[in-house]
Amino acid sequence: LKKLSSETIDLILADINMPVMDGLKLVSLVRNNPSYKDIPIIIITTEGAKEDKERAMAIGANAYLAKPIQTQELIRMVSSFVGS
């Protein structure tokens, strides 16, 4: 979150399982801040259950990829949010 206030961020890649703050909490905090609410967020995680994806999307993630991911799929997805 410190980076958001000090730099221009075009897109956030986050995992659900992160050490300091889980990715879902991060999505929630970003979406609840008017200054950052429009930044696209892609969740990349080992959590592939349908319920995990639905929860992430419901709180504001723009996309959800379960590992292992295909590099071309990630590139296509990032490009769709920030251009080529």
Image: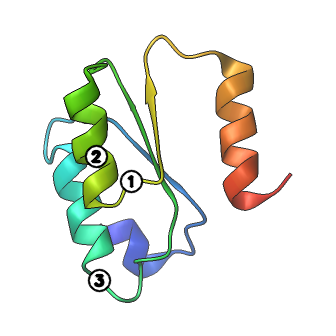
User: What's the residue at 52%, 61% (across, down)?
Assistant: 40
Q: Which three-letter amino acid code belongs to the residue tagged 1?
A: Ala
Q: Which three-letter amino acid code belongs to the residue tagged 3?
A: Asn
Quarter of the figure with the N terminus: bottom left
Q: With 78 as the anchor, is 39 left or right in this view?
A: left
Q: Nearer the viewer, mark 3 or mark 2?
A: 2
Mark 3 — residue?
Answer: 33
Q: Quadrant of residue 6?
A: bottom left
First in residue order: circle 3 vs circle 2 = 3
State the image coordinates of residue 23 (x, y, percent, origin top left): 25, 45
State the image coordinates of residue 55 (x, y, percent, origin top left): 22, 45
Q: With 54 as the anchor, is 83 left or right in this view?
A: right
Res. 17 visible in picture: no
Q: Nearer the viewer, residue 15 or 81?
A: 81
First in residue order: circle 1 vs circle 3 = 3
First in residue order: circle 2 vs circle 1 = 2
Label 2: few (<14), some (14–19) or many (≥20) C-alpha neighbours in 10 Å: many
Marks 2 and 1 in Cβ contact (< 8 Å): yes
Could you say whether the residue bearing mark 1 is in a helix, strand or loop?
loop
